[in-house]
Structures are given as structure tokens and as C-alpha cells.
Image (tube, helix red, strand yellow):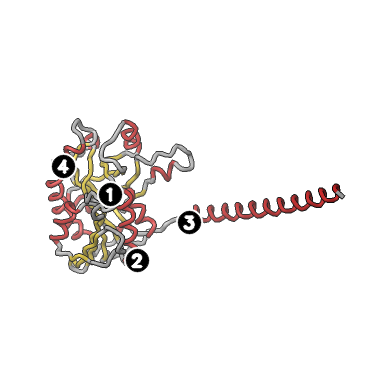
Amino acid sequence: EMTTFRKNHLFTFTSATAAALFLILSSKILLTRSSLVHMATKITLKKTESIKNVVVAIAMEAEAAPFIEHLSLAHTEDFFPPQAPFLAYQGMHKECHITVVTNGKDHVHETNVDNVGTVPAAVATFLALQKLDGAAELVINAGTCGGFQSKGAEIGDVFLTNASANHDRRIPIPTFEPYGVGRIESVSTAELAKEINAKQGVCTTSNSLDHHEVDDLHMKNNDASVKDMEAAAIAWSCQLHGTPHFGVKVVTDIVDGDRPAQDEFLENLHSAAKSLQEALPKVIEHVCGRGHDEL
């Protein structure tokens, strides 16, 4: 009887185990197939022959204020969910609808400083594009940056991005490395660069204003001309929505110089905001009404 009991229970256990293994293997196969399908899905950017709806993403209020005032944009109260600290300002420039999005102030840590960095930038941009429900035809990431003198950058220079990448998402696992770097190409702006006499280059992004030797190595690998704290995050959200994008960056500090970044940044923020105010209206004037292939 004991032998029969053991055999029956052994058979039961074996059957249960086999069934569980079957379910696990089946789910793994389905997961693998789903992953392959996801990997094979290429994001297609939506392009038009006449841009009439533009989002301008700016991290800091001081950077945004002169431009908002210049275009007489009005604050849109219910643009973002009530929990979000982000702000939106909207209006028309000729036949082009403009939405300026800023990251707002920090209330989580009760510092009331600007919400700089990749997390607020990515969320604000994603929510803005979601709110506009496909209407946005171009995102311009405008703001200040550090510049590399080895790439010809000087204080006050205006740069247009031709790509963005991360230099602080270091994941030394082969399959994760491309995600960590997260390089995303910007829409071509060759004609705009000529028109406003701007320089062009890759913007490398991290969540730190300062940098160390490891950062320097990765920024060099990114072939960076300028450095900021938002561009790669904004580009990521734009890609998810299939919205073309590029950055307009004004240099406040020299990354590969001999002065601390924070000192130069604070010293030159006001003048950089003024340069941005001068450049942005020209950018808007150029892109509105043109096709993406004419920028």
C-alpha cells in the first residue's frame, strides 16, 4: 500500500511539475516572441510639409520668461494634471500654434528651485505631447548648456543639436549599452544653422552639472560638442510619440576649461537667457510653415 501511495503521489507530483514546466516554457516563448516583435517595431517620425504646431521645452523659468513675454503667450491653467508641477504657455505666432512647456518648481523636496534634470524633462515633454494628442509637429528643446572648447564652443555660442546621448547611464552589459547611451538623432537643421549663424553638434546629457574623469571619457565617446541635463530625455519622449525634434542650446560654461562649471553657469545665465531670447524667435520664424526636410 505504501509503495502504491508513493507511486501515485510520485506520478501526481511529476505530472504537476511537468504541467508547471510547460506553462513556464510557454510563457517564456510568448514573452520572447513579444520581445522580438517589440524589438522589430521601428518608430517612424511624423513629418509634414508645413509645420504649424510647435512645442518648445525649456527647463528653467529664467530661460523661458523672455521668450514667453516676447510672443505674448498666455499661461494655460489646465494643460497638465493637477499633481504635476509643470507649466504651459500657449499662443499664436502668425499661423503657427506655439506651446512653451517648463518643468516648474520643486515641491517634493521643498526647495522651490527649478526642476532640472532628465526625469522632469521626460515626463513634462511626454505629457505635453499626450495632451496635444498628435497635433504637435515639432519639439524644440531650448536652454543653456556647457560647451567644449575642443569643439570650438565659446561662451554665448548658439548650438543646434544633430543628436543627443547620455553619458551617465553606464550599464556595462553588452545588450544594455546602446540603451544606456541612448543616442537619438535630431531632425536636420542645416539651413537654420546657416540662417542664424549657429554651430551644430551632439548634446550629451547627465543629471549632474559637474563632471568627473569617467564622465569625460563617455562624453568624448559621444562626440559631444555641448553638455546639458535634459536633451536626451526630451528626445526619448519625442521618439515615443513619433515627433521630430532638435535642440537650441546657448553656452554658459566651458566643460573642458579650467573654471568650475557652477561658477561660470551662474555668472553667464542672464546673458545666455538674453541670447536665447534673441535666437528663439528667429528659430520659430524659420520653422513655422516649412516642411521638416526644409529646416
Residue annotated with mark 2: 134
In terms of sequence position, does the residue under pointer 2 or pointer 3 come before the other? 3
Give coordinates of residue 168: x percent, y percent: 35, 40
Q: In the image, residue 294 lies at what x, y percent?
A: 27, 58
- Decide which of 67, 5 is in the foreground and name it: 5
**Residue labelled with disc 4:** 266
**Residue depicted at x 31% and y 33%:** 216
Q: Nearer the viewer, mark 1 or mark 3?
A: 1
Query: Does residue 190 show up?
Result: no
Mark 3 residue element? loop
Which residue lies under the disc numbered 1?
Answer: 109
* CA–CA distance in space, label 2 to label 3: 19 Å
Per the model, the C-alpha gap separating discs 1 and 3 is 39 Å
Residue type marked 3: Thr
Amino acid beneath label 2 = Gly
Q: Residues within 10 Å of mark 3 (few under 14, many from 20)?
A: few
